[in-house]
Structures are given as C-alpha cells and as structure tokens.
C-alpha cells in the first residue's frame, strides 16, 4: 500500500531513467479501506506523471456453481448431500446455475466511480475464484485450465485492454534473436 515504503517511488524513478514507464494498471478491492490506499497511489501517479492505463476491481464478487456449494441447515449442520439430491431429482437444471455474492460491499460508487473521479478507464471486475488460487499454487495457467470461468474471461478482457492500450511488437522469427 502507498505510504508504507519507498519501493514504488524507487521503482518509478528507476523506470523513468530507463525510459521504460508506459503506465500503471491500478488494482483495488471494492471496500473503502482499499480504495483509500488506491486514491493515494492515483495521486502519486498524477504527481510523477505516470499515466494510469486502467483501474481493475479484484475480488469483486464470489461466483460458484450451485452444484459446487456446501449447504447448511438452520442449525448449522451440513445438508449439502440432501440439497443436491433434491435439486437433481426435482430440477436438475438448477445445478448448472451460478450463485453470486458481493463479499465486500463497495462504498459509494465503488472502484468504477473512483475511475470516473480520476478520469481513468475502468477495466472491469475480477471475481474470486478458488481455482485461480489452486492454479497459482500448482504453477499452472488458470486461463488455460479454466477458460470458461467468469474470472478467466475477466482476466482475458483486462489483458485485451492492456494489449490494445500498449500494442505489443511482434518479432520476425528470421531476425537474430540474440539481440533480444
């Protein structure tokens, strides 16, 4: 978080000397304590003339298939097996639906409103996905392993925004790769 150390100042100074600052992608979660830190970083970017390319809202929601959730009875006991069996018998199409919850309520207009306030693009929300953590821990590509998940689609949209904003140069395979 901004204000806890000088790493971001040193990094920007180093990158500016190397003429290697294209911009910053600022990541926040929707609760006010996170956005307060991010506003400090947005002000830092303005003062140091580092363009902010976009703001991304991380951990915006939690989404899971109904068939992958655990269910508790009024007394707190686990009734998952019974609920899934009943859904499967009575209305199996429900098992393919997703439940979605805003775990961290956003304050005011949230990260999207903050992006408007700072005249910066809002690049979207990345939902919590337990498979993302698992893939990271296993050193696997989340977007390759779970391409149809909401989080993978959100990550791909953000990457598309980044590539569109900062086009990547392609290297001719016939060129001598040693210079790179």
Image (tube, rainbow, N blue to C red):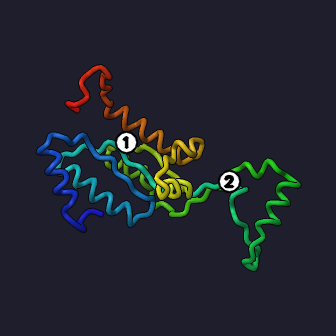
Say which of marks 1 and 2 sits in front: 2
29 vs 139, nearest the viewer? 139
Left or right, residue 13 beside residue 58: left
Q: Residue at x 74, y 73 (%)?
A: 78
Please tell me the numbered disc located at residue 121: 1
Q: Which residue is situated farthest in the left direction here? A: 17
Question: In the figure, 38 relative to 162: above or below?
Answer: below
Whichever of callouts 1 and 2 sits on the residue coming sooner in the sequence is 2
Q: Which residue is situated farthest in the bottom direction here? A: 75
Label 1 SS: loop
Q: Give the image location of residue 142, x and y in percent.
A: 51, 48
Q: Quadrant of residue 145?
A: top right
Instruction: Tell me how many marks there are.
Output: 2
Label 2 SS: strand
Left or right, residue 64 beside residue 14: right
Residue located beneath label 2 in the image:
65
Left or right, residue 84 beside residue 155: right
Q: Give the image location of residue 21, x and y in percent.
A: 21, 42
Q: Which residue is situated farthest in the right direction here? A: 89
In which quadrant is the C terminus drawn? top left
| Separation of marks 1 and 2 at Cα, in angstroms | 31 Å
Q: Give the image location of residue 126, x and y in percent.
A: 49, 50
Q: Quadrant of residue 61?
A: bottom right
Q: Residue at x 31, y 34 (%)?
A: 166
Left or right, residue 47 beside residue 2: left
Please tell me the numbered disc located at residue 15: none
What crowding class fits label 2: few (fewer than 14 Cα within 10 Å), some (14-19), or many (20 or more)?
few
Q: Quadrant of residue 148?
A: top right
């Amino acid at each position: 978080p901004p204000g806890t150390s000088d790493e971001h100042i040193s990094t920007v100074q180093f990158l500016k000397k190397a003429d290697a600052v294209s911009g910053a992608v600022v990541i926040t979660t929707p609760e006010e304590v996170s956005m307060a830190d991010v506003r400090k970083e947005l002000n830092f970017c303005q003062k140091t003339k580092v363009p902010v390319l976009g703001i991304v809202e991380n951990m915006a929601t939690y989404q899971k298939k109904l068939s992958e959730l655990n269910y508790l009875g009024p007394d707190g006991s686990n009734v998952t097996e019974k609920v899934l069996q009943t859904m499967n018998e009575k209305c199996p199409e429900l098992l393919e639906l997703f439940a979605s919850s805003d775990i961290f309520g956003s304050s005011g207009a949230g990260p999207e409103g903050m992006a408007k306030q700072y005249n910066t693009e809002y690049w979207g929300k990345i939902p919590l996905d337990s498979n993302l953590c698992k893939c990271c821990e296993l050193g696997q590509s989340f977007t390759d392993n779970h391409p149809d998940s909401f989080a993978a689609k959100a990550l791909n949209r953000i990457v598309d925004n980044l590539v569109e904003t900062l086009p990547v140069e392609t290297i001719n395979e016939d060129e001598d790769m040693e210079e790179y």
